[in-house]
Amino acid sequence: TPFTDAALGFESFGRSHCFLRRSAGGEDASAEQEPLSEADVEEGKVEEFLHFVRCRRLSVMHIIDCEDGVVELTPLDGTGFEKITLPVTANRLLIFRHDLMRYTFRTGGPSLAMQAWILSEPLAVEFLGLEGSPERRLEAMALTGPPRPLANGPPCHVVALMERMAGSVYKSEDALAMFTSGGDTAVRWPKARWDEEVYYIDDPAAASMGKTYSVHGAFMDFSEVLCFDNKFFNIS
């Protein structure tokens, strides 16, 4: 809201989901959180959690039920705050700046609480570059594939050169002729790839109707697409 910047020192962007906290007891006392699987990593669970940690600002905790509860607020270095210990009981509301302090919630018996966070605007990420060996860079960019000849390795003897470009360009001579003549190989959509009635409409405002007003492009021959060995190049 427009008022959080002046009142709380940050500009709010939204809030997190509400989490339900309860004390562990009995069989739950020894329960451990399952580690993340590769599928979780691929789905962005790690990035999602890091985004939450970086953007959380104001913690709002409603203590629904609690017996002999204590909350310790420990400020981060450089904030100038002092450590605070607060006794908490049922039906209490605790609000604090989670980006400026850490907290510990301890109870002497069963407890139940709901917690949510006011978030700041997501941080913009700017890619500056990759450091390390060329092999590690390719691995980080998921560009791994057949090994490349090394500059100081055995010589590589090229016996043939072939290209695959739009417009049935298969040889370097064809590519040179196409570029020097100013050709663009633009053709109408191949009907084997897209249904014009579904995606195309002859109207400049086609985007507002969820369609496109362009029906031309430069395409590889369909036979070349079918013959491409994507597994050899490690492309899914």
Image: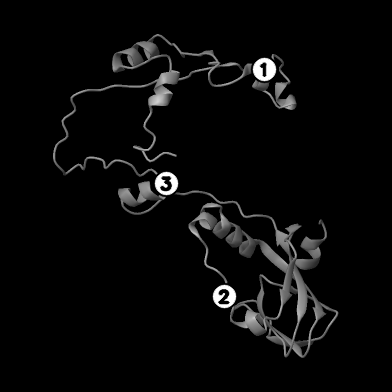
Residue at image mark 3: 141
Q: Are marks 1 and 3 in contact (CB under 8 Å)?
A: no
Q: Is 208 rendered above or below residue 74?
A: above
Question: The residue tagged with tag 2: helix, strand or loop?
Answer: loop
Which residue appears at 41% of the width and 19% of the height? 223
User: 191 or 114: nearer the eye?
Assistant: 191
Which residue appears at 70% of the width and 66% of the height? 57
Q: CA distance from mark 2 to mark 3?
A: 34 Å
Residue at image mark 1: 197
Mark closer to the observer (2, 3):
2
Give the percent coordinates (x, y) of residue 215. Answer: 60, 16
Residue at image mark 2: 32
Question: The residue tagged with tag 3: helix, strand or loop?
Answer: loop
Amino acid under disc 3: Met
Residue 147 bears which disc, if any?
none
Give the percent coordinates (x, y) of residue 149. Answer: 22, 40
Query: Splitting the image into 4 quarters, where does residue 177 fall?
Result: top left
Amino acid under disc 1: Glu
Question: The residue tagged with tag 1: helix, strand or loop?
Answer: helix
Label 2 vs 3, first from the N-terminus: 2
